[in-house]
Amino acid sequence: MAGLAVSIDHVATLREERKIGIPDPVTAAAIVELAGANGVVVHLREDRRRIRDRDVRILRETIQTKFVLEMAATPEMVGIAMEIKPDVVTLVPERRDELTTEGGLDLHLQKDVVSDTVQTLQKGGLPVSVFVDPDLDQIKLAHRINADFVEIHTGIFCDADTQKRRAEAFDDIVNSAKLAHKLKLGINAGRGLGYQTINAFKGLSEIDEFIIGHSITASAVIVGLERAVREMIALIKEL
């Protein structure tokens, strides 16, 4: 069965609305783990718009499952990762004008920078995932730069506005996952996944873990965080 790692970035989004310290992502991480998630994910952005350095340091001390740090491939972030020692680093693209990560790394354009970052982090003992679009060339390049995992961008599928586009996007995810599995890459999938869209992945056994944040946080506002996580885990168990 695939696992679930929960992104708690949007807990920090709520906190930053009032900047009074609540809700605390550290508390949220503990609840996520108690609810049965396999890991906790945060994205430390250059502008610190959500997650802060303080959060990352405390989370490293308190998370008992798996701590995944998403970050850009920059010297500053490499330094922080080498100090904090998360269980996995996921390299993601980052633009200041985006609301959230909107697409995968372009390994054609960024191959050298990403490759150097992967090597540096791995030499420091850190497994590395690269966040890429569901594209066979991107999967091949991820393998070529010796990434340990790929995280396949599922947002194109989740946001598709016609049945035809959704089917095409899902075919791309399936083909990418199967190629990554053949190349012996670890396979995660995330962005935009929710309680309805997760059902489409039934039978796609190549995926090791789903990374889900916004939909769980949104549900938590209504039913509570522990229940929101447990309900998502129950759906994943049926896949």
Image (spheres, rainbow, N blue to C red):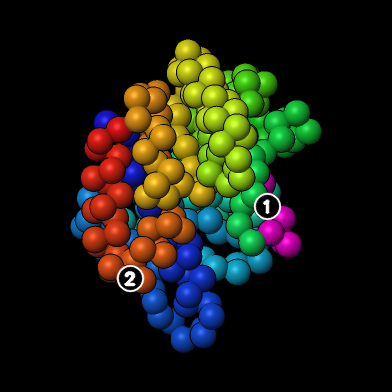
Marking on residue 11 = none
Marking on residue 94 = 1
Q: Position of residue 151 (x, y in %)?
A: 51, 36
Membership of 78 in magenta stretch: no
Q: Quadrant of the C terminus?
A: top left
Most extreme residue toward the right, as rendered?
109
In this view, 88 is above or below 48: above
Q: Position of residue 233 (x, y in %)?
A: 27, 46
Q: Residue at x 67, y 38 (%)?
A: 105
In this view, 25 is above or below 65: below
Residue 85 located left or right of residue 90: left
Figure quadrant of residue 63: bottom left
Secondary element at image label 2 = helix
Question: What's the CA distance linking mark 1 and mark 2?
Answer: 30 Å
The mark closer to the camera, 1 or 2, is 2
Q: Which residues are magenta?
A: 93-98
Decide if residue 121 is in sight here: no
Residue 88 located left or right of residue 96: left
Q: Quadrant of the N terminus?
A: top left
In this view, 41 is above or below 107: below
Label 2 belongs to which residue? 222
Mark 1 residue type: Glu
Q: Residue at x 29, y 55 (%)?
A: 229
Tell whether label 2 touches label 1 (CB within 8 Å): no
Figure quadrant of residue 146: top right
Q: Residue at x 55, y 30 (%)?
A: 167
